[in-house]
Image (spheres, rainbow, N blue to C red):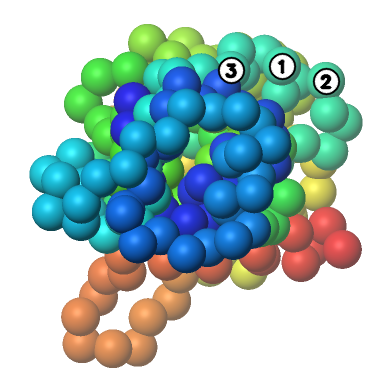
Amino acid sequence: MLVYGRNIAIEYLKKNEKVRKVYLQEDFRDKNLILAIEKSKIPVVTKRKMELDQLANGVHQGIILDVEDFRYTDYEDFLDEDDAVIVLLDHIEDPHNLGAIIRTCEAAGVTGIIIPKDRGAEVNATVIKTSVGAITNIPISMVTNLNQTIQNLKNHGFWIVGTDMERSVDYREIDYSGRIVLVIGNEGTGMSRLVRESCDFIARIPMRGKVNSLNASVAAGIMIYEVFRQKG
């Protein structure tokens, strides 16, 4: 998998992630990154900007890394933390939304993220780029069945809090003490019916504007920080 951008490169090199090869623009001048690459003894290929543009599907800032495919975590590894906060994404489709949510989760200290195997964005170069390197610092699990996963989490003492504008309560009125799973629904259709029915609470974020919706990553950020505000 090819990932790109200076912040991404810094995080991969800092974490000693497996990097097979580095592609550098011929006039690349970031001395700190060049030194880190040299210390890691990673093979370097110098290319013209136009050649890097063809490799990267976005702004590469003169550096592209050839890395191993992203390694997902078993979500049961999340279950050992007494006061865990898990974010479960119910078929988020936009990789930019996924990357932004990952960035917020890492910043806030979320225990882990769960995404579905089908009908949703998976971790790719765009997601990694949007997360600005945060993806190397937070575990992400991919599961085949969200509903079974939710039931298993309930059996381990988690409260499930979904997000929707219908038949819901103000998100600030919910008690987030204990082990929490926050469910963020699809950008267009929200939570699926079975996932909604599995929730213990349905939260809404009050809005006073004429456009009665929020970007999924913005809604996730508001919810995540309310959970941690209450937890202190």
Closer to the observer: label 2 or label 3? Answer: 3
Could you tell me which quadrant the N terminus lies in? top left
**Looking at the image, which residue is at 31% across and 54% down?**
26
* Residue 101 in sight: no
Along the line of sight, the residue nearer the viewer: 155 or 103: 103
The local secondary structure at tag 2 comes to helix
| Front position in the image: 223 or 171 | 223
Q: Position of residue 183 (x, y in %)?
A: 47, 41
Q: Mark 1: which secondary structure?
A: helix
The amino acid type of the residue labelled 3 equals Thr
Residue under label 3? 73
What residue sits right under mark 2 in the picture?
80
Image marks 1 and 2: residues in contact by CB distance under 8 Å: yes
From this view, report whether residue 47 is shown above or below residue 214. Answer: above
Classify residue 223 by image quadrant: bottom right
Residue 77's disc number: 1
Residue under the point 47% across and 64% down: 29
Question: Could you tell whether 223 is left or right of 187 in the image?
Answer: right
Mark 1 → mark 2, Cα distance in angstroms: 7 Å
Residue 18 visible within the image: yes
Disc nearer the start of the sequence (2/3): 3
Whether tag 3 and tag 1 are in contact, CB under 8 A, the answer is yes
Q: Label 2 crowding class (10 Å Cα cut-off): few <14, some 14-19, many 20+?
A: few
